[in-house]
Amino acid sequence: MILQNFIVFEGIDGAGTSTQIEMLKNRPEAKDFLFTAEPTSAPTGKFLRQMLKGDFPLQNESAAYLFAADRNEHVNGKLLTQGNTLVTGIKEACQSGRKVVSDRYLFSSLAYQSINCPPEVPRLLNSLFPLPQLLFYFEISPKDSLSRLGDRNFREIYEKEDFLNRTVQEYHNVLSEYSEKAKNQGMKIVLIDAKKTKEEISANIWQEIKNLPIV
């Protein structure tokens, strides 16, 4: 099922999705959009962010279940916003006519969680969530992405070159898998060359968003 008005940005750490979402926020045309991210800022997401920092080591399968639980609140929970930030309630917001832009979604789980736990686990857990109307995937090499993260004071548990190399391959597998679903159900997948300038990428993204069918 496609959720109209739902837009997702995907890519490995350091690909530039967060930068582009901030640029989109500053567009006057996007003043009525809602912006969000996964893990969420709800209690479930806050726990996951601590896990990603290495504060709470978990079994890989447990992490997959927790990401799916956080996503369920994100999508199906009661609409809760703070300014133009959406905490929970993507479905309710989109069905009311608001455009919702999320930094990461189920495709991240299928890429990241499929590496260290049986791939059927994240696929089963995420099989019932709606697909976005528009999916941007930012293409970048792990070496380049990690160089962008060089100035940060900490690294999350997945931010290692060998792991991200495997994640990129899993992302490609996921995009290949979902390309047929996209054709049949109406999700558009747009590949972004993350090495282009921020301005070029921003213009490309806005061109795609403004051409979305009005619902």
Image: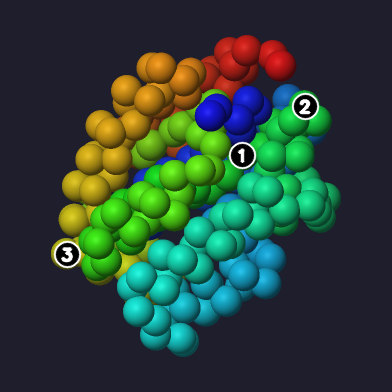
Q: Which residue is mark 1?
A: 101
- Crowd around label 3: few <14 · some 14–19 · many ≥20 (10 Å): few
**Which sits in the foreground, 89 or 195?**
89
Q: Is residue 30 above or below residue 103?
A: above
* Mark number, residue 162: 3
* Amino acid residing under circle 3: Asp
SS of the residue under disc 2: loop
Alpha carbon of mark 3 to alpha carbon of mark 1: how far? 29 Å
Residue at left 24%, top 48%?
Answer: 170
* Amino acid residing under circle 1: Val
Residue at left 23%, top 40%?
Answer: 173
Q: Is residue 25 left or right of residue 148?
A: right
**Which sits in the foreground, 117 or 104?**
117
Q: Position of residue 80 (x, y in %)?
A: 80, 53
Q: Is residue 150 above or below residue 181?
A: below
* Mark number, residue 25: none
Q: Which residue is mark 2?
A: 97
Residue at left 56%, top 62%?
Answer: 69
SS of the residue under disc 3: helix
Alpha carbon of mark 3 to alpha carbon of mark 2: how far? 41 Å
Residue 142 sits in which quadrant? Answer: bottom left
Depth check, mark 1 against mark 2: the one in front is 2
- Crowd around label 2: few <14 · some 14–19 · many ≥20 (10 Å): some
Q: Is residue 17 left or right of residue 119?
A: right
Residue 96 sits in which quadrant? Answer: top right
Q: Is residue 191 visible?
A: yes
Q: Are marks 1 and 2 in contact (CB under 8 Å)?
A: no
Alpha carbon of mark 1 to alpha carbon of mark 2: how far? 13 Å
